Image (cartoon, helix red, strand yellow):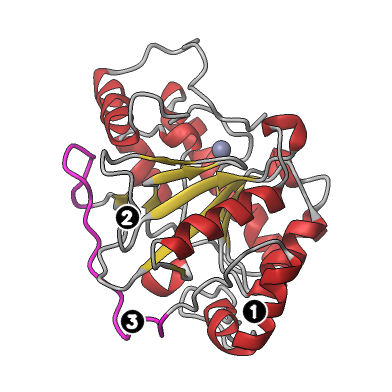
Amino acid sequence: MDRISRPPARQGKPRRSASRLVTVLLLIVAGAACSTIDLRTLESEDGQPGGLAANAGGLVTPRQRAVAAAKWGLGRPPLAAPPPPAVKPALETPSGFFRGPGLIPAITRVPTTDNVVFLTIDDGTEKDPQFAAMARELGVPFSAFVTDSAIRDDYGYYRDLHAHGHAIHNHTLTHPQLTQLEPEDQHAQICGQQDILQHEFGTRPALFRPPFGDFDRDTLVIARECGVRVAPLWSEEAFPDRLEYRRGDRKLHPGDIILTHFNGPRQWGGSMTDMLRLVLRKVTEQGMALARLEDYV
Ligand SMILES: [Zn+2]
């Protein structure tokens, strides 16, 4: 269900002008061809297990990273992320997005001068053990934004990722287009998934990503009511064969958030390990390291 390419044809409740504005702005951010528009041993302040940042730079040694890079077909090992910031940066909501008291911030990047970018992986349909092993052996941090209907057949796969330091965040119960829902139904989608993830993983997610990047003011209010702090969107989207840039300069910038999906050959003609190899090549050749989003947001 989650080969997100374009929002499906509108059905049901007529869209309000405000939500249409958000969609238009997102499309501008994402570009005309956009497809649419989540180990330290200690717990971090948001209750998610820490550690992958330390894993990337510490528990996985440079030698181990080099060996793993050769095993997984990378010419160069990924760069280790710098130490996380002592203070998380103040977030900047892009102009045109909803903002204000009572709304959580929606962001497409993190304001930082560190040469880091963040990998976020959505939905959850493909549960590839090779991908989990590759990320673990290379010390690669990423954050998962999961939909209950996509992962309920194998929560164990995600519990294993969580145990290895990958934060698991909220991407709704069934992946609807939230701006077509009444507020009470948005509430059920977001709070319902918060409750399930809290039950399954022992922590209430701090981050929420709306399906298709489509949200309205109600979404950001309701997400806050459900215990979410931030709604990260994205700056680039990764596939097994390409990285789609949202800026005209076709470069990664410090703090960019990369979106990809738990997809497999049936959805996009490649594997999760193909996707990660592509991402690591692009990130490393541009002098960037993948860092842990929860260390900055
Ligand atoms: Zn999705």
Q: In this view of the protein, can residue 257 be seen by the observer? A: yes
Quarter holding the N terminus?
A: top right
Give, as a three-letter code, the residue at label 3.
Answer: Pro
Give, as a three-letter code, the residue at label 2.
Answer: Arg
In percent of width and height, residue 54 lies at 54, 85
Q: Quadrant of ligand 1?
A: top right
Left or right: where does residue 270 sit relative to residue 278?
right
Q: Secondary structure at mark 3?
A: loop
The residue lying toward the viewer, choosing from 235 and 152, is 235
Reading the image, the residue beneath label 3 is 85
Quarter holding the C terminus?
A: bottom left
In percent of width and height, residue 103 lies at 28, 49
Reading the image, the residue beneath label 1 is 65
Q: Secondary structure at mark 1?
A: helix
Nearest to viewer (mark 3 / mark 1): 1
In percent of width and height, residue 109 lies at 32, 55
Residues rendered magenta in the picture: 82-101
Q: CA distance from mark 3 to mark 1?
A: 23 Å
Label 2: few (<14), some (14–19) or many (≥20) C-alpha neighbours in 10 Å:
many
Give, as a three-letter code, the residue at label 1.
Answer: Arg
Label 3: few (<14), some (14–19) or many (≥20) C-alpha neighbours in 10 Å:
few
Q: Residue at x 33, y 39 (%)?
A: 246
Reading the image, the residue beneath label 2 is 109
Q: Secondary structure at mark 2?
A: loop
Earlier along the polypeptide chain: callout 3 or callout 1?
A: 1
The residue lying toward the viewer, choosing from 193 and 249, is 249
Q: Quadrant of residue 176?
A: top right
Nearest to viewer (mark 1 / mark 2): 1
Left or right: where does residue 269 sit relative to residue 84?
right
